[in-house]
Image (cartoon, rainbow, N blue to C red):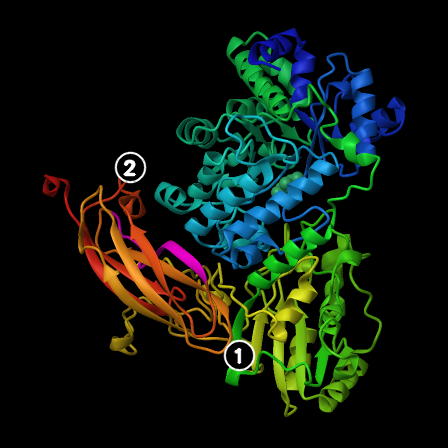
Amino acid sequence: MDNNTLLEKLNSLSIEEKIGQLIQLTGDFFEGDMDTVVTGPLKKLGLNIDYNVYNTGSILNITNPEKIIRLQTDYLEKSIHKIPLLFMADIIYGYRTIFPIPIAQACSWNYDDIEHAASIAAQECYDEGIHVTFSPMVDIVRDPRWGRVMESPGEDTLLARKYAQSVVLGIQGSNLDSTVPANKIAACVKHFAAYGAPVAGREYNAVDMSEHTLREYYLPGYQAAIEAGVKLVMTAFNTLNGIPATGNEWLNRDVLRQEMNFDGVLISDYAAIEELIMHGYAEDEASAARLALLASVDVDMKTAVYANQLKNVISGNDHMLELLNEAVYRVLKLKNDLGLFEDPFRGLQETVQLPTSSVLSDEHKKAALSLAEESVVLLKNEHELLPLSKHTKVALIGPYAEENSTLGMWAIKGEEADTVNLKTGLLKLVDPDNLSVCRGAHLLPLDAREAFDKYADKLAVETSAEEVLLHEAIRNANEAEVIVLALGESIYQSGEGGSRTNPTLPEPQLKLLYELSLLDKKIILIVYSGRPLILTEVVGKADAIIQAWYPGTMGGEALANILYGEVNPSGKLAMTFPRSVGQIPVYYNELNTGRPNLKENGFYRFASRYIDEVNEPLYPFGYGKSYTSYEYSLLSISQKEMKKNELVDIHISVSNTGIYDGKETIQLYIRDKFASVARPVKVLKDFKKVFLQSGQTKIVEFSIHEEMLKFYGREMKYKSEPGEFDVYIGSSSQEILLSFSFILLPEDNHE
Ligand code: GLC
């Protein structure tokens, strides 16, 4: 539909029909006869009795092609305006083919594969009739107590930008005009803004930070999604410096719409408009409706506020009527960009009569396997215990030994039955005679279960007595050469609402590890988690440690391939692993302070340090081991003085000096030695992931350009400042192998 026709459509709508386009409900409002709806969901949500569900603009989380066809058909028959419904869902890291959780994907540093994974999720959604997915989530996180680390791109701004861009392009395609092509759907970047920095890591808690910090670290991820053409943005639950994001005019109109040039749909998070009242920011529903519309929120997800209040809020107020029309236009334009006016079933009919062939196809599973292999991080490998020989007699022990619940909390369409668990993965490679398997311990303390009451039916029923489990584990371990110990936090200890004050392995599992460590057996610990756990107490009890995260549908096969050396691990941490909770937040790009705790000063009290813990984390950002080794040497630097419009070209040589082929992520960090605001001791500015055969050497090139040197100065202007810069090139943020300095010349030197 061309724009004029779209505007005509908008102007043809009644006020009720316009408001209806801004309402998002769940599918139960369209099930059963009207009495059932009125006395059921409509009453429960508090919608006015005269609300016409056939004015509703979009549906949340219906993910069944036949149901989508039935709802859309029924809706188009009964609605007056015949504007098709939008179907939106939380397909965050896979539809039926589930990829590793986003924090794991971020550890792959492979953004081509991340984009490919997103395109596969979009394809499977397209085949099953979904129009919009609420991904990518790009909330920077420096606090592993927060449960939603699992769906974040980690602590670094550059990785968040790359993740945002890759996922949006994967989901939507890089279409130059605004239409969303076939096999693609619309993406929604979230949560705007800075939801990943709640005070004390406590879910939904306040976010308070300087405008400098917000702009320097937290906003660029959302900006990258907008530059990639993202169709929707979702507001965050939290207050930002005292004002709830969902009612924050400065954040949503001045920053998002004006500065970041976003003209797409802004949808609230679940019930976030109504929550303006609970925040103490709106005194009632009418006030919440007005504040949200003034803050440019277009769609009210799953509350009655817009439906019940907007008509009164707008009545007699031309400005508010104009804001309503703008909001409705953006929703209609999204539907038009998706081609829904021409085809409300958007490709569904071609596939719904057939089994939707793309779902869980071998090609999709192969991509999930490959990304899982690159997302796993090898944290420890004493005496090169790994990789194992397939002839080694292994005792696979632990609650995750044959656990299929390894998809993470946002795999709403993922089927555990489709998952390759660790035992299944290992048996693809080794003879069953070389593998014993047992649970060894309960996943959670039995008294912890009430904390997961909502998921009680999904939690494994722990019937065996702990001593029986332990006895079997010790017997199996004694009969084996090596123990592979698969431990982890429950997926229900992670994700939304999953904040933990002490993010460690559950107590029954720590007991199991302790008991097995008393045996004279080598232990390979595999950690399943949705966040960096505090592993300090366990590091000394294991000879090798693999961080598996929640690796998705093909996780068990990926881990088996790594254990037996079919694949050389190449993951690098996208988030710091603290040594203790007391260090949190601990991250690599910290400021130097006026009294840095310098090793050469030894134990000097009056430095920025603790008296009961070191400053350094257990594992730093960018860290990850390999089965092989690499050597870096600096070959050339084009110049040591750079004008703004010039480049510093760097050539380094990287050699694989070990016996295994492998992929190495060479990281380039820059430090601005002095500036109008204190700058971090280092900031990741580029990286290259390079494949090297054993014995192979490659030349790796980087170019430093002025854009890399920009930052938000005191007056919040994004610009570079002349002066000296240090460059660090390494295999992690701590393992710096090469360094040099250069000068950015002042402008007047540019004659
Ligand atoms: C949830 C989440 C958000 C999700 C939305 C819809 O509470 O905060 O990420 O997309 O509601 O389910």
- Dot 1 falls on a residue whose secondary structure is strand
Residue corresponding to mark 2: 717
Among the two numbered marks 1 and 2 on one chain, the one whose residue lies closer to the N terminus: 1
The residue located at (75%, 27%) in the rendering is 345
Q: Is residue 516 above or below residue 555?
A: below
Q: Is residue 344 above or below residue 416?
A: above
Q: Quadrant of the N terminus?
A: top right
Q: Is residue 44 visible?
A: no
The residue located at (52%, 76%) in the rendering is 380
Residue 324 is situated, as x and y percent measured from the top left of the image, at 57, 16
Ligand 1 falls in quadrant: top right
- Give the foreground label among 1 and 2: 1
Q: Quadrant of the C terminus?
A: top left
Q: Is residue 34 above or below residue 95?
A: above
Residue furthest bottom as drawn: 520
The residue located at (31%, 47%) in the rendering is 708
Q: Is residue 155 visible?
A: yes
- Dot 2 falls on a residue whose secondary structure is loop
Residue 711 is situated, as x and y percent measured from the top left of the image, at 30, 44
Mark 2: few/some/many CA within 10 Å (<14, 14-19, 20+)? few
Spatial CA distance of label 1 from label 2 is 46 Å
Q: Nearer the viewer, residue 192 or 560?
A: 560
579 vs 681, left or right, is: right
Residue corresponding to mark 1: 381
Mark 1: few/some/many CA within 10 Å (<14, 14-19, 20+)? some
Query: Where are the magenta residues, as a range?
Result: 677-690
